[in-house]
């Protein structure tokens, strides 16, 4: 069901709370998209999908400058964005130490550093704990938040899609620091509340106020004149609430109205496609309203066993990813799965591309948003951390797009240095320093 | 600098109606006697009327209270002679004092006089919404009442159920389990297995059960382990969900603490807090696992309001799980306390925000956990009907009475007319219901109508539990069981056994003994042993003592004052004497010549003391007002107790005597000081002492009672004995209990209410439970012309 249309137009203030408690008070960063032709906001979105890719389907045939990017059928949904894409081969996750490949695959992916010794046992290697350092999204967030002109209300938002409710190194990629994993929010209703402050409840509440006033009047009639005075005061409070709800709607409208969210969506496997689109819609809206300039979008988790029935697949994703190369049946299914992820990325890019930057001077939001799609493994059935499928899309960092580069053998720490520098954050190392010897990847 | 701090006396000065007269002189009297006027009127007009008003109505500007009361002419005369006019009491004595007393008494002071004058009692029943605590209690009980009822059983106490499992491979449970009860959650398994039959390298354990809390407030929890741990507090626990080793896929169940992933060998500490309502029991579960780490160790600690960190377990903990209790976390403003007790006579914006947030939270709780309340599936063809029935049941429970057809249509039917999501309809219904005055006001009586049985049921439950009626009470109401005084009596006695009644009385004593909002802490360099842990134990000792007295068979008020023992444990014995071993509180006999009940309980002695010394004034004021029930006026001038400016060789008694020696001070301090001085044998943390600054303590003093008798006090026991036999003291206690239970002024229940209650109290040998029964009965049957008239009348 969607929002009651009578109240949809209203952007109502937090339930019964005074205006000062409102998240969107004028003056706070994130209230409106910036006005006037200020330089466009630069943004970072990192999208994760698990269990490795099909390398033969993913990587293009030709690499290097001057070679037009040619996408295989698995990535066909991304065809319209080819000119804004940059595919990076030969970039490896070199982080060793405790934890199996899946754990290090996801928990060292954005951190570029080792895991602490711990008690979580994978299918091989020693058990391990959380990552030892900050992830690149949080690094950029801290950088943005440290400066007045890039500071936003949330700094970063972590979206999840079908992430199981568990906290372990297979399930976290964002870290605020050593031993500080950040849980993605995989319930769109919860995220909606965080962003827009419980609009459904306010609408429900507003919808009963007329009845409530009738009831108060009705009850009042039975009382003594003295007792009625207190009820009159009470009634006044209800009327005030009504007025506040209406006036804050006027004062606090967003530059981009909030998306419509099914308030009763069930967070179950089969609803994943719906949840994914809701999350992407909110991600784009939060960025359009400049509530944040950094976001992650995590599909499932490393070793995730999503059963993608909406694609006609009954097997668990992780099980499929273990099948040998010769298994045609499995390969077909994995193609469908990654094709679907590519489609979700395309949807994200499309939504950003459709949204002009404020003032219309700086192109679309996609022109200023660096999307990085990645995976914890290069390939599922051999658990390699080499040739992680890094696919960059959009224009946030000013990289030269429309091509694929094979770096043969570089660390992914170097990629994160490039990203940081692309946002003007000139750090010399990121993650484990010894993996930064080559400096940033030349992407411009 | 410390203030003597008597400003707060003001608010208590109004409660009983003692008198302070203005000027009074003899000359005027004879002059007017010849004119046929009452001799006393002339004196009154000349010297009293400016402050007290023509009919003794008082003067709000100078805070002179109305001159209404129930004393005899003789008692009035004695008082005037000693105290009036305020600064020069010697001006009006003997015959003049008696004459003006006679006039005052007959003209307007006595109940008869006021009746004749048609002066209305000022006290009236004030329409009240629920107080903050009532709101939280009602929501908790209301939500619980929607779930299938579990028959109440007496739960075993003394620990949590512990289930131990071997595990293998990737943190997977290996099936084999050892079950036992663990009294405290503090384990150092070292390099061994936790119990026989469980291997040391990797294993897991689950502890679960429930725990009882006495106080309302934030409870903090803290885990300490180098291994993995998750803690669930007040979440719905199901036996079949026991031990998810590495997975908790139930999105509905959020861990309070999740520290499942270790970080090398370091012992990690994680903490979180949760708001809980006192007088209730909550489910708890802790999941733990060890994997290849060298050492296995886990400790769960908690900290109650007013408490310190201690290991979780013990007598408040039971191995049996209980249902989740929904606790509204909305913030409410403090309730009005201007009359000395919390009541719901004001509505404000902050309050409205609180109840709005509470309604929204409750709507969320009900719709999120629908399957806990009713059997219903997503595709149930009867879904709409079932949900409407559910809502009707909810509204009826919330309004505490059966719902008529019109109301059912208004509160339920109308909310379901739109073709939308049914859960949204449920939410609307809950919001409308919980914001309705029918829910928010315990009683909305129609003018001139007698209360029906459901109103009486609500009066009973709010008075005894600060909550709504339970199912049994409503059934009794429906079947006409509240139609007789005996029937009401029986219900009250049943309800007294409920833990909510204990919670409410516990709250009363905290308030009566002024434990809420004072800090008994002392200067650590002077009293190094008086640690937070000692303070926590003392608080527990005092409240446990009071509770033992109240809920014993005798339930004797006099035992509160006169008991010849303290409840102490090993830690307290080290300071106060005795030879108890261990942390449990046990009776320790005290020297009856030294100590007497709560009067010398170290917690109160410390509470009413400075941070570095005793305070005879704080102790004396407490005894005057709360124990002896006498009124005190605010101090005519603010004097600070500035220790540095006083001669350091003086004892505390000498200092107080010195700074309160002015006449203006002595009108009150002649009462306060003797009482305070008689406790000078107890130092600032309540230890017995014989000397101060090498001078022998002088605890003897002359105390003038309210009726003008001289009493020589030599210590606490003399005060206890006097209070235990003093009708004024009894009256003050009754009044305080009345206010706490009924949240209304006693005078609004008829001019003889207090006198009748006092007689009954005395006849019952001062049985506190019997007093509560009488108070609640009086409150519940107010305006029932004959108790037998109360019959069930559904509303609407």
Image (spheres, helix red, strand yellow):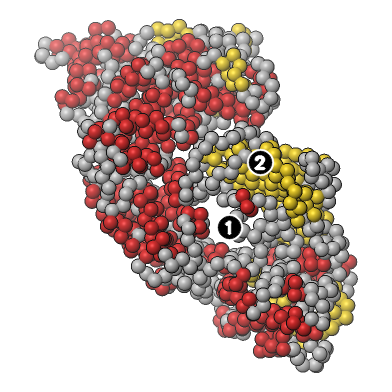
- Say the numbered circle drawn on residue B252: 1
- How many C-alpha atoms fall within 10 Å of the one at disc 2: few (<14), some, or many (≥20)? many
Position of A43 with respect to A434 (left or right) is: left
Percent coordinates x, y for residue B615 in the rendering: 54, 21
Could you tell me which residue is drawn at 66 percent across and 80 percent down?
A340
Can see residue A62?
Answer: yes
> Vertically, is A105 above or below B618?
below
Count of marks overlaid on the render: 2
Q: Where B589 sits versus A196, above or below?
A: above
Residue shown at 24% from the left, 10% from the top: B98
Q: Earlier in the sequence, mark 1 or mark 2?
A: 2
Reading the image, the residue beneath label 2 is B161
Secondary structure beneath dot 1 equals loop
**Label 1 and label 2 in one chain:** yes
Looking at the rendering, which quadrant does residue A275 occupy? bottom right
Q: Is residue B633 left or right of residue A168?
A: left
Quarter that holds the N terminus of chain B: top right
Distance from Cα at disc 1 to Cα at disc 2: 23 Å
Residue B79 vs residue A350, the one in the foreground:
A350
């Amino acid at each position: 069901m969607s929002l009651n249309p009578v109240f949809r137009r209203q952007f109502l203030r937090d339930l019964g709370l005074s205006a000062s408690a409102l998240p969107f008070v004028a003056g706070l960063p994130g209230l409106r998209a910036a006005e006037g032709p200020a330089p466009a906001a630069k943004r970072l979105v990192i999208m994760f999908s698990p269990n490795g890719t099909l390398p033969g389907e993913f990587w293009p045939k030709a690499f290097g400058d001057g070679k037009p990017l040619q996408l295989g059928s698995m990535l066909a949904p991304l065809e319209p964005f080819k000119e804004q894409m940059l595919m990076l081969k030969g970039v490896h996750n070199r982080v060793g130490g405790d934890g199996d490949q899946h754990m290090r695959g996801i928990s060292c992916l954005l951190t570029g550093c080792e895991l602490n010794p711990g008690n979580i046992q994978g299918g091989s290697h020693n058990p391990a704990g959380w990552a030892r350092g900050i992830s690149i999204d949080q690094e950029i967030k801290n950088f943005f938040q440290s400066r007045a002109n890039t500071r936003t209300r949330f700094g970063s938002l972590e979206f999840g899609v079908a992430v199981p409710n568990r906290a372990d190194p297979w399930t976290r990629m964002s870290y605020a620091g050593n031993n500080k994993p950040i849980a993605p929010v995989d319930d769109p209703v919860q995220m909606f509340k965080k962003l827009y402050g419980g609009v459904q409840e306010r609408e429900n509440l507003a919808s009963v106020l007329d009845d409530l006033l009738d009831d108060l009047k009705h009850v009042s009639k039975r009382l003594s004149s003295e007792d009625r005075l207190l009820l009159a005061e009470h009634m006044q409070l209800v009327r005030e609430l009504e007025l506040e709800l209406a006036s804050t709607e006027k004062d606090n409208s967003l530059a981009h109205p909030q998306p419509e969210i099914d308030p009763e969506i069930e967070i179950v496997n089969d609803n994943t496609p719906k949840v994914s689109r809701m999350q992407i819609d909110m991600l784009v809206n939060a960025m359009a309203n400049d509530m944040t300039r950094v976001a992650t979008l995590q599909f499932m988790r490393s070793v995730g066993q999503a059963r993608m029935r909406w694609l006609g697949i009954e097997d668990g994703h992780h099980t499929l990813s273990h099948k040998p190369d010769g298994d045609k049946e499995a390969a077909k299914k994995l193609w469908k799965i990654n094709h679907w992820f590519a489609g979700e990325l395309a949807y994200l890019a499309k939504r950003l591309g459709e949204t002009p930057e404020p003032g219309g001077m700086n192109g679309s939001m996609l022109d200023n948003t660096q999307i990085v799609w990645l995976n914890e493994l290069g390939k599922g059935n051999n658990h390699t951390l080499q040739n992680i499928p890094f696919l960059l899309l959009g224009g946030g960092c000013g990289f030269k797009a429309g091509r694929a580069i094979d770096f043969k053998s570089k660390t992914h720490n170097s990629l994160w240095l490039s990203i940081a520098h692309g946002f003007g954050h000139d750090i010399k190392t990121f993650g484990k320093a010894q993996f930064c010897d080559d400096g940033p990847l030349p992407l411009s | 600098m410390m203030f003597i701090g008597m400003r707060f006396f003001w608010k208590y000065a109004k409660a009983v109606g003692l008198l302070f007269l203005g000027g009074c002189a003899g000359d005027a009297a004879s002059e007017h006697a010849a004119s046929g006027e009452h001799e006393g009127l002339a004196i009154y007009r000349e010297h009293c009327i400016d402050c007290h008003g023509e009919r003794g109505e008082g003067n709000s500007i100078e805070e002179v209270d109305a001159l209404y009361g129930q004393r005899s002419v003789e008692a009035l005369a004695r008082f005037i002679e000693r105290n009036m006019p305020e600064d020069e009491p010697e001006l009006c004595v003997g015959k003049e004092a008696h004459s003006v007393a006679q006039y005052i008494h007959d003209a307007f002071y006595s109940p008869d006089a006021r009746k004749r004058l048609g002066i209305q009692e000022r006290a009236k029943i004030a329409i009240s919404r629920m107080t903050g605590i009532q709101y939280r209690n009602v929501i908790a009980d209301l939500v619980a009442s929607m779930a299938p009822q579990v028959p109440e059983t007496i739960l075993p106490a003394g620990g949590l159920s512990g289930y131990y499992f071997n595990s293998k491979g990737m943190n997977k449970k290996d099936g084999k389990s050892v079950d036992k009860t663990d009294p405290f959650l503090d384990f150092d398994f070292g390099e061994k297995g936790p119990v026989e039959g469980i291997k040391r390298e990797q294993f897991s354990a689950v502890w679960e059960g429930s725990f009882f809390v006495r106080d309302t407030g934030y409870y903090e929890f803290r885990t300490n382990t180098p291994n993995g741990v998750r803690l669930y507090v007040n979440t719905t626990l199901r036996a079949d969900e026991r031990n998810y080793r590495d997975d908790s896929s139930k999105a509905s169940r959020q861990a309070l603490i999740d520290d499942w992933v270790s970080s090398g060998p370091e012992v990690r500490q994680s903490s979180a807090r949760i708001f809980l309502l006192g007088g209730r029991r909550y489910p708890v579960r802790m999941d733990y696992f060890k994997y290849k780490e060298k050492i296995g160790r886990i400790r769960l600690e908690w900290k109650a309001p007013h408490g310190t960190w201690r290991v979780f377990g013990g007598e408040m903990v039971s191995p049996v799980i209980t249902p989740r209790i929904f606790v509204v976390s909305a913030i409410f403003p403090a309730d009005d306390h201007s009359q000395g007790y919390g009541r719901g006579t004001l509505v404000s914006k902050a309050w409205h925000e609180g109840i709005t947030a509470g309604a929204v939270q409750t709507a969320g709780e009900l719709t999120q956990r629908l399957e806990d309340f009713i059997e219903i599936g997503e595709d149930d063809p009867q879904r709409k009907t079932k949900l409407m029935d559910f809502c009707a049941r909810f509204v009826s429970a919330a309004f505490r009475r059966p719902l008529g057809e019109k109301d059912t249509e208004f509160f339920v039917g109308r909310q379901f007319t739109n073709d939308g999501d049914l859960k949204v309809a449920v939410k609307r219904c809950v919001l409308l219901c919980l914001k309705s005055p029918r829910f928010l006001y315990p009683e909305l009586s129609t003018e001139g109508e007698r209360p029906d049985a459901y109103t009486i049921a609500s009066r009973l439950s709010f008075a005894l539990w600060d909550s709504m009626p339970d199912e049994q009470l409503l059934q009794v109401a429906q079947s006409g069981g509240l139609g007789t005084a005996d029937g009401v009596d029986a219900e009250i006695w049943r309800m007294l056994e409920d833990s909510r009644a204990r919670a409410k009385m516990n709250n009363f004593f905290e308030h009566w003994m002024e434990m809420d909002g004072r800090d008994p802490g002392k200067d650590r360099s002077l009293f190094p042993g008086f640690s937070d842990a000692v303070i926590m134990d003392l608080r527990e000792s005092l409240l446990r003592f009071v509770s033992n007295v109240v809920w014993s068979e005798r339930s004797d008020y006099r035992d509160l004052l006169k008991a010849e023992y303290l409840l102490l444990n090993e830690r307290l014995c080290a300071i106060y004497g005795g030879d108890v071993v261990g942390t449990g509180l046990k009776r320790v006999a005290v020297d009856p010549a030294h100590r007497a009940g709560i009067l010398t309980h170290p917690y109160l002695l410390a509470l009413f003391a400075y941070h570095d010394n005793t305070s005879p004034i704080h102790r004396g004021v407490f005894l005057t007002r709360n124990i002896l029930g006498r009124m005190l006026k605010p101090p005519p001038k603010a004097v600070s107790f500035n220790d540095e400016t006083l001669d350091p060789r003086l004892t505390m008694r000498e200092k107080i005597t010195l700074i309160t020696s002015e006449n203006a001070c002595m009108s009150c301090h002649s009462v306060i000081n003797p009482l305070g001085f008689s406790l000078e044998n107890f130092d600032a943390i309540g230890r017995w002492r014989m000397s101060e600054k090498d001078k022998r303590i002088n605890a003897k003093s002359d105390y003038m009672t309210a009726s003008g008798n001289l009493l020589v006090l030599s210590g606490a026991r003399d005060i206890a004995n006097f209070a235990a036999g003093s009708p004024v003291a009894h009256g003050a206690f009754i009044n305080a209990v009345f206010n706490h239970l009924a949240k209304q002024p006693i005078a609004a229940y008829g001019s003889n209410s207090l006198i009748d209650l006092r007689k009954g109290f005395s006849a019952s040998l001062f049985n506190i439970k019997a007093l509560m029964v009488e108070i609640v009965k009086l409150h519940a049957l107010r305006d029932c012309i004959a108790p037998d008239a109360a019959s069930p009348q559904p509303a609407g």
